[in-house]
Every structure is written in structure tokens, then in C-alpha cells.
Amino acid sequence: MKRLEGMRRPTLHAVAARAGVSKSSVSRVINGEPTVAPAIRETVLAAVAELGYVPNGAARNLVTQRTNTIAIIVSDPPAGLVSDDPMFAMVVRAASRELERAGKQVSLVLAGSDESRLRVEQYLAAGHVDGAILVSMDGADPLPAVLSRTGLPIVSHGRLATPGLMPWVDNDNHGGATKAVQHLLDQGRRRIATISGPLDMTAAQERLAAYRDTLKDTGRRSIIALGDFTRISGADSMRQLLEDDPTLDAVFAANDLMAIGALRTLRQAGRRVPDDVAVIGFDDIEAALYTAPALTTIRSPMTDQAVQTVQLLLTLLTQGTAAPVTLPTELVIRESA
């Protein structure tokens, strides 16, 4: 019997008895409350170490009303645009690692239909998580408004089309696109086209606006094809641009996947890159290093953006408020422009 008692897990009562303080004092020390006197804190921590006491997480969560779990919610459109993009895995991996470093459990949730959005809202409202990070690319996505009704701390990876719903972290899309178009102008390119992303996405809107603004200052006209951030749309849009204006000598694609598709069309059309047509993308995905020629692009710090999004949520959890964050971008010059 004594052996069984010796194997029994130390209790809060045992720690209090060993330290010579009340159980409430032990509880305050374990939960990190700042109101405990330093001497009492040291005594309790010494007793915890001596007995090998491990706090009961479930019981502590009942007291603190915290689950220590954060949901990463990926709003995936029917076409699978988010999950097919290599940036998706990078964002989820970086955010998950940062949350784990902060001592948080991660719950990955996919939402791509009305039914799944309702389930996500119910899941969050039921108190299963302390907060959430939303990864959404579709400007018409109803999920941000749905989630804002739960009252939970939620931040967005990427600026939302509807302002004020939740704090966000995004790259400087306008500034990055301006650098790309200006680089083409500095090279003496005369007829510069763009392949835009879907115009219900804020990133696509900002990159297109930058393209137009930069060309407007030079008196050049805009030459625009509408893509959807996929390789095939880049290839099709490049084909359309060549048919509409065979004399164009440069193209800025609003992301690297479309730029890669554009390179394929140009190669099939017998156009040399960059001699005949210069090409610039946006994002600096790993594949940009291995295109032929290697792709000039705008580096958006996607890992940093994911980490900053986690930090923004942690700030929101502890302080109750957080301001949006915009991260700088960088022009990476390679062989295509």
C-alpha cells in the first residue's frame, strides 16, 4: 500500500503542505499570477521541484478558461486555389512552428463550403480554442464576417477586403509591384503588360493598381490580362496578350505561378526571354530558381508574415487589441528580366 502511495501523482494539496502555504497560494504561483510575494513563490516552486508536481492541464484550463489551442483556419475555394499553391504549405508550417514555440496546440481546420463554414463557426463558438488565424485569399469569402461574430480573438494572414473585421498581417503588395514595373521601365521596356490575379482578392487589386499607377506616370497605356493565380491561367493569359499585342516586350505577372505559365507560352511562341520579352513574377517561390531562365521576382517574406501573424494573435490574446502589420518586399533580379 505504501508503495502504491509512493507512485501516486503529487497533488496540489501535497505541494501546499510541503511549502506550508494554502492551496490557493500554490494555484496562484502555478498559474503565473504576479500578486504572489517573491518569498512565497520561491518556497512553492521549491516544493514543486522536490515533489515532481505536474499541473493538471485540464483542471487548470477549467480555472483559467483557456484551452491553449489555436485554430489555423484555411478558407479553401472550390477550385482548391489555396491548397494547390506552394505558399500554402509554407504558411501553415511556419505558423504551426511559431505557435508550438509559444506553448500552443494547433488545430488545422479547412472551410470551403457553406456547411463547413457553419461547422467552423460552431466549433469556435463552443470554446474549443482560444483564438484563430484565418488564411483566406478570396475577397468575397463570407468566412471572416462569420468568424467575427464568435467574439474570439482572430487575426487574418493577409489583408481582408472588408476593413475592421479583424487585425491582419500582409506584404506590401503595392510597393512590391511598383518595384517590378519600375525595373522593367529602367531596362527600357516600352510595351509592358501585366497578368493580374482575381480582382476579388486584395493582393491582386493592390498589385494591379501599382502597375497602372506606375505606367500612368510615364504616359504608357495599360495592357492587362486577367488570370487566377494558377500556372494554366498564366499560360493562357500570355497567349492572349501576344495575340492582342505582338509587339509587347515585357510582362509583370501578379504571382510566380502565373509567371511560370507565361514563360512556357513564350517559349512555345519562339519568344526569347529576356531578349524579346522580359518577365517578372511576385512571391519568390522555390520554383522561381529553377525556371529557364531563372525568374526575376518580388520576394514577399511569407515565413516572416506567418510568424508575425502568430505574434499578432498572441498580442491580441494578452492585450485585447492589436494593429495591422505591413511587411516590406524586395526585388530579386535573376535572368528573366
Image (cartoon, helix red, strand yellow):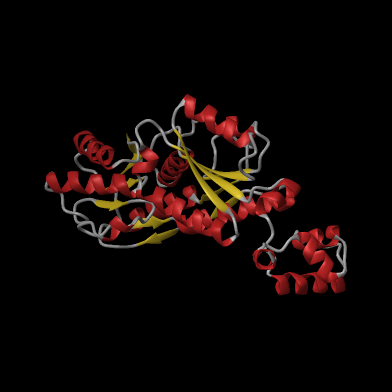
Write down the quadrant of residue 13 in the picture. bottom right
Image location of residue 223, percent across then percent down: 32, 38
Which residue reaches farthest front?
1
So how many labels did they put on this image? 0
Q: Is residue 216 left or right of residue 6?
A: left
Write down the quadrant of residue 197 in the picture. top left
Identified at 37% across, 62% down, the residue is 332
Identified at 51% across, 29% down, the residue is 117
Q: Is residue 90 left or right of residue 278?
A: right
Identified at 20% across, 57% down, the residue is 292
Write down the quadrant of residue 25 in the picture. bottom right
Image location of residue 16, percent across then percent down: 82, 65
The image quadrant where one finds the C terminus is bottom left
Relative depth, front residue between 175 and 281: 281
The image quadrant where one finds the N terminus is bottom right
Relative depth, front residue between 316 and 46: 46
Q: Is residue 161 left or right of residue 1?
A: left
Quick check: can you spot residue 280? yes
Identified at 47% across, 58% down, the residue is 303
Relative depth, front residue between 182 and 157: 157
Image location of residue 286, percent across then percent down: 32, 58
Quick check: can you spot residue 305? no
Image location of residue 102, percent across then percent down: 60, 60
